[in-house]
Amino acid sequence: MTGTDSLPEPHVEVHADAAALATAVAGELLNRIADSQAAGHVPAICLTGGTIADAIHREVARMAPESGVDWGAVDFWFGDERYVDRDSPDRNAVQARDAFLDVLGVPPHRVHEMPSPSSARSVDEAARSYGAELRGSAAHEFLVTMLGVGPDGHIASLFPGFSQLTAHDIAVGVTGSPKPPPHRVTLTLEALAHSAAVWFLVSGDAKADAVRRALAEDGTVAETPARGVRGTAETTWFLDHDAASLL
Ligand SMILES: O=C1O[C@H](COP(=O)(O)O)[C@@H](O)[C@H](O)[C@H]1O
């Protein structure tokens, strides 16, 4: 691992299937937010996009009424975003709004979306703007950063072999993404790791080899970007049985 060796070792939690995984992660997230608020904090959560994230978000909405969370006192940020129209269904933020943020009435000023083409002229301008917003915010550290993982081992919009993996800014633009849409904005590995807990969320056997590579003794971040992030207090891999099948 690069720059992560001094941090706590990853912990692996395996659930029977994607539905059980989503319920477990949603419950844990609600507990963490409620505990942080009870301690007087306004926690910052870094969201991800993708299939399992959507299932988790819907479970958060379903379980929220029992949680005691004050939805006016938690900030949501995004680990990456697709540089497409603000209302495009391809946007991670649109998926999150539909699945739980709007359902729960999270105030718009608590949802920190990445810029779209209507508010930034390029992916680089969007990245600079989002980096400045995050730098200027009260979020010194995320409470939880959630990360989906692609079959190629990508996290956020940090893809194998791409130069963004070694960037030291907070956020960077991406063009030519191997997964559509091609234009994106992503937090860097350093910015994602500015988090007490980093949670990898993975379901399905198509991702089993990426999970194996990410947790193997040997390997590089350039080949498997998911190797490049750990939380300062905790790193947990939430897997379903199929995603864990090669461990
Ligand atoms: O493109 C992306 O892919 C990953 C994983 O998505 P999935 O559909 O394979 O679960 C996601 O975590 C990332 O935020 C997203 O932009």
Image (cartoon, rainbow, N blue to C red):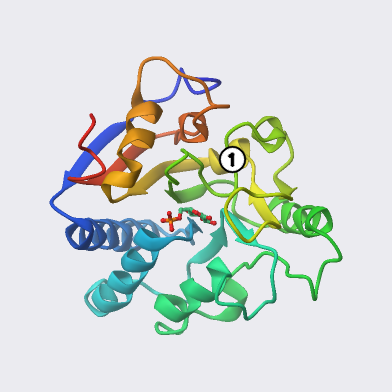
Q: Nearer the viewer, residue 66 or 5?
A: 5
Left or right of residue 126, residue 94 in this image? left
Left or right of residue 188, residue 60 in this image? left
Q: Can residue 68 be seen in this view?
A: no
Q: Can residue 160 be seen in this view?
A: yes
Residue position marked by numbered label 1 in the rendering:
159
Looking at the picture, how far across and down is residue 193, in whole percent? 53, 38
Q: How crowded is mark 1: few (under 14 residues within 10 Å), some or many (20 or more)?
A: many
| Secondary element type, mark 1 | loop
Residue drawn 51% across the image and 49% down it: 142
- Name which quarter of the figure residue 71 lies in: bottom left
Residue drawn 60% across the image and 42% down it: 158
Is 59 placed above or below 65 here?
above
Looking at the picture, how far across and down is residue 96, in whole percent? 47, 72
Q: Nearer the viewer, residue 13 or 142?
A: 13
Left or right of residue 231, residue 93 in this image? right
- State which quarter of the image contains the C terminus: top left
Residue at the right extreme? 121
Residue at the left extreme? 16
